[in-house]
Every structure is written in structure tokens, then in C-alpha cells.
Amino acid sequence: MSSIRLLALLAVAFFVGGCTTFTDQDASALPRAAAWGLVPIVNYSQAPQAGERAEQILLSVLAEQGLQLRHYPIVTQADVPLLDDRERLSQALSWAGSERLDYVISGSVEEWQYKSGLDGEPAVGITLQVIEPATGRVIWSKSGARAGWSRESLAGTAQKVLRELAGAMRLE
């Protein structure tokens, strides 16, 4: 009887672990007291404004860790918000240099959707990076992906991924 329970427990652990994937990189600790900023997260998914959604969730996740960020302001072109994420990122890195920020957090959204099918599980894939604006050097990076359960929200799944990614940043 106990071997059946053990097998069932291992099967559940394997199933749950199969729904989440993260890369990892060893990096030195980053100073929490430095001047930090959040620049655009580039959207490579097919969901409109997924990068902006991830940015808003990330702001609250990083605030939980005591990290206060300056957020890059919305840029307009002829009274219309600039929609090209790569151009926004380029302008934001210039802004970060002019603001004398020590580090900025950026990244990309690779997946942001509800999977098709009966269950319609939320699926999120995000990469975060810490960049030194003065040099343009990426000093930390981590990617994560997760498929949630059928009754879970997309924002809730994204929050779990972002919390895991941000938690991996070693802050001192």
C-alpha cells in the first residue's frame, strides 16, 4: 500500500514539475541600494501589450523585495504611443543613461496566452535581464515558462513566473 502512495506522489511531483521550466545562471549579488529602473519588456508573443502587462506585474513583485524602481515614461510620437517595443527599449536605455541609473531591468515576453482546447490553460514565457546602462552589458539573465491550471488566470500565472525570476536575482 505504501509503495502505491509513493508512486502516486512521485507521479504528481513529476507532473507538476513538468509544467514549469526555468533557466539559471550564477551571478554575483547586486546592490539593492543602487539606482534601479524598469525599461520596456519587449513583446515577442502574439498577445497585444503583453510586455506592458508584464512590466506592471513586475513592478509590484519587485516592490515586495524592497526594490524601488524608476519606470520609463510612456513615449509618444505625434500624440500616439510608440508601439515598436525595440525602439522603445533603445530610447529607454538612453533615458536610463541620462538618469544615471546603475541598473535597469528589461526582458522579453515569449508566450502570453490561453492554450486552445477544452481546458484553456494559461501559458506564460518570460525572460528578465539586468543591464548596466553605462556599458550596455547584460549582467544577469533568467528565463522561465509555466503553464497554469485550467481555472487559473493568465495574470496569476505570469505573477508566479515573474516572482520566481525576480526571486532569483541576488540582492544585497
Image (cartoon, grey):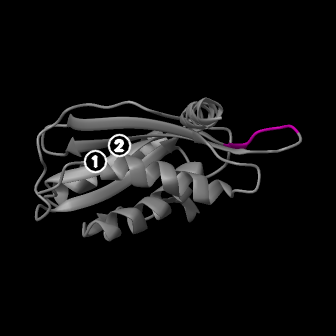
Q: Quadrant of residue 16?
A: top right
What span is colored magenta in the figure? 113-117
Q: Name the residue under label 1.
A: 93
In this picture, residue 17 sits left or right of residue 31: right
Q: Position of residue 55 (x, y in %)?
A: 46, 57
Are the two marked residues, 2 and 1, in contact with CB atoms closer than 8 angstroms?
yes
Q: Inspect this view and state whether residue 121 appears.
A: yes
Q: Which residue is drawn at 20% across and 32% down?
A: 26
Q: Which residue is drawn at 25% across and 70% down?
A: 66
Name the amino acid, label 1: Leu
Q: Residue drawn 23% across and 55% down?
A: 96
The residue nearer to you, when weighing 54 against 161, is 161
Mark 2 = which residue?
Answer: 90
Residue 75 is left or right of residue 38, and the answer is: right
Q: CA gap, disc 2 to disc 1?
A: 5 Å
The residue sitting at the front extreme is 1
Q: Residue at x 46, y 37 (%)?
A: 144
Q: In which quarter of the image is the C terminus?
A: bottom left
How many numbered discs sit on the rendered protein?
A: 2
Secondary structure mostly seen in magenta is loop
Q: Magenta stretch: residue 57 in it?
A: no
Q: x and y percent of residue 65 in the render?
A: 28, 65
Q: What element carries label 2?
A: helix
